[in-house]
């Protein structure tokens, strides 16, 4: 397992990050614990979650994935200092006007709730899940800076920020000597490149932000399980994949990945992950297995790198 610095920080994280959106939703707690243990045993020390996971599911009040992680840490005996835990704040955790957003009031309440659920006294990486147009960025960053100074949060990051909002945040932190975003969590994969590469990639490269892509397998599209001439599962997730990737570009990308996978004797998902891992700008793609079999397949990407020629061929097939 290769460990990488998270951006310009000294925090070292595994080359794969364990995403937990499925925990307590499509993976129950015992299975979630097995996946976490298998990943840790393989060297994965980086766990990503969010307070809202998975509030959209029936019967799920939010905070469930964090609570599952907290109980796993206690029950497994894994030393807390051997883990890098990242969580997020922004989404609605209640019906009140201050139960969401990036105001100081919500951040201060949300971080305490996350700490309780995770059964820890600090969060390694606290991320703003997406931007808040109703709250000045100065207010958000001052609240986050206070949490860093208090020791409740070690580093801060953001997710789903356009380049201009990320630059605004970096400028405000520099101007007022506040903690700054040290990582970005973008939507980025072989079939969805432009959103990150158009401007955000240069910002991250120039200012030394770690890059933690989510949806590296395009919601399952880059596993090869979908076919143009086959019916899709009856689920919102599958329909979302269909609307985004079932087009000429998507099928061309998938064909190129499948060809290389066959040549290398690897799975389609392993090649898709290796494409990200072969880019020095990328810190750690966030995988989201909901079965042990999916985890074992994802784990096959650990240490896997593409040659310059292989990466160039996939770059060409997926160019935007």
Image (cartoon, rainbow, N blue to C red):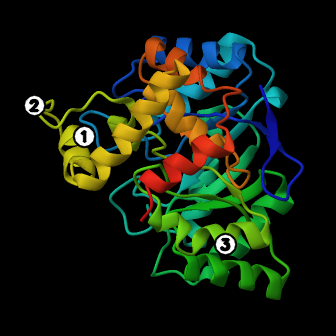
**Image quadrant in which the N terminus is located:** top right
Helix, strand or loop at label 3? It is: helix
**Pointer 3 with pointer 2, Cβ within 8 A:** no
Q: Is residue 111 visible?
A: yes
Count neighbours of disc 2 (C-alpha within 10 A) and say few if under 14, some if 14 to 19, many if 20 or more: few
Label placed on residue 164: none
Mark 1 = which residue?
237
Percent across and percent down for residue 175 are 81, 88
- As drawn, the residue found furthest toward the bottom would be 175
Quote the CA–CA distance across marks 1 and 2: 14 Å
Vertical relation: 160 (above or below) 262 = below
Q: Nearer the viewer, residue 139 or 34?
A: 34
Q: Earlier in the sequence, mark 1 or mark 2?
A: 2
Q: Which residue is mark 3?
A: 202
Residue at image mark 2? 231
Which of pointers 3 and 1 lies earlier in the amino acid sequence? 3
On the image, the x and y values in percent for residue 188 come to 49, 54
Which residue is found at the position 64% from the left and 84% from the top?
Answer: 168
Q: CA distance from mark 3 to mark 1?
A: 31 Å
Residue shown at the point (14%, 32%) measured from the top left = 232
Q: Residue at x 39, y 57 (%)?
A: 92
Expressed as whole percent of the image width and height from the top left, the position of residue 280 reads 74, 51
38 or 112: nearer the viewer: 38
Locate residue 163: give its quadrant.
bottom right
Residues at marks 3 and 2, CA–CA distance in whole angstroms: 39 Å
């Amino acid at each position: 397992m290769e460990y990488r610095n998270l951006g310009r920080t000294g925090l070292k994280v595994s080359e794969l990050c364990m995403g937990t959106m499925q925990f307590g939703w499509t993976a129950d707690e015992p299975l979630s614990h097995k996946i976490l243990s298998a990943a840790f045993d393989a060297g994965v020390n980086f766990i990503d979650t969010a307070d809202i996971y998975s509030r959209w599911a029936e019967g799920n009040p939010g905070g469930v994935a964090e609570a599952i992680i907290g109980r796993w840490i206690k029950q497994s005996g894994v030393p807390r200092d051997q883990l890098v835990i990242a969580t997020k704040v922004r989404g609605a955790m209640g019906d009140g006007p201050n139960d969401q957003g990036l105001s100081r009031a919500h951040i201060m309440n949300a971080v305490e709730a996350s700490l309780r659920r995770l059964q820890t006294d600090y969060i390694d990486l606290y991320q703003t899940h997406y931007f808040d147009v109703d709250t000045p960025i100065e207010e958000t960053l001052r609240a986050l800076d206070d949490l860093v100074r208090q020791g409740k949060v070690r580093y801060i990051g953001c997710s789903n920020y356009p380049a201009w909002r990320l630059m605004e945040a970096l400028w405000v932190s520099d101007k007022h000597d506040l903690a700054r975003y040290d990582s970005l969590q973008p939507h980025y994969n072989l079939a969805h490149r432009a959103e990150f590469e158009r401007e955000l990639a240069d910002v991250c490269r120039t200012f030394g932000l770690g890059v933690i892509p989510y949806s590296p397998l395009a919601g399952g599209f880059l596993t090869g399980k979908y076919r143009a001439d086959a019916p899709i599962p009856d689920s919102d997730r599958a329909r979302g994949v269909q609307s985004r990737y079932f087009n000429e570009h998507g099928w061309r990308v998938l064909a190129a990945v499948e060809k290389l996978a066959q040549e290398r004797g690897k799975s389609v998902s392993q090649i898709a992950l290796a494409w990200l891992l072969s880019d020095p700008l990328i810190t750690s793609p966030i995988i989201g297995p909901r079965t042990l079999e999916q985890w074992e397949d994802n784990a096959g990407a650990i240490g896997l790198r593409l040659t310059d020629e292989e990466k160039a061929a996939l770059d060409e097939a997926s160019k935007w």
